[in-house]
Amino acid sequence: MDKTLLIHPGEILKEEFLEPHGISANKLAQNLGIPTNRITAIINGTRRITGETAILLGHAFATSPEFWLNLQLRYDLDVARMTVSADAIRNADHFAQSMAA
């Protein structure tokens, strides 16, 4: 997978939810009762969306917490697919074969 195709959930938060409604990270954070730097870090792709934040975002934007956590999970898996070495995958495959025998 090409790293340029990775989409962090913060990018979706910014482009699909904040910008269309003219909401700043500061305004969102204030209304959710959380530090602004948590929202800005998510938007900047340097912080993960936690369960707590997913619940708050779900309520704020009439989505489910699972929506936000699934975005994070997909991003994390895509990053892992790019970084896990072929040797590690081979070792895991060999282990699985030995367990089946």
Image (spheres, rainbow, N blue to C red):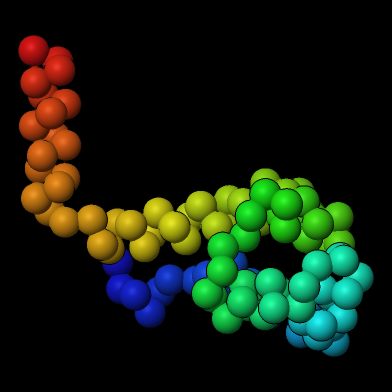
Residue 92: x %, y % from top left: 16, 37
> Residue 10 occupies which quadrant of the picture?
bottom right
Q: Describe residue 40's horizontal placement relative to residue 87 as left or right.
A: right
> Which residue shows up at 33% across the image and 57% down it?
80
Q: What is the residue that sits farthest to the right in this orientation? A: 31
Number of numbered discs:
0
Image coordinates for residue 94, horizontal then vertical, percent: 8, 32
Above or below residue 55? Residue 26 is below
Q: Residue at x 38, y 59 (%)?
A: 78
In the depicted structure, whether residue 70 falls above or below residue 36: above
The C terminus: image quadrant: top left
| Residue occupying the point 62% across, 72% down | 42
Location of residue 56 with respect to 31 vertically, above or below: above
Above or below — where is 39 with respect to 59?
below
Name the residue rendered at 91%, 70% in the picture: 31
Could you tell whether 52 is left or right of 73 in the image? right
Q: Is residue 37 visible?
A: yes
Q: Between 17 and 72, which is closer to the camera in this rendering?
A: 72
Measured as percent of width and height from the top left, residue 60 is found at 86, 62
Can residue 67 be seen from the camera position used here? no
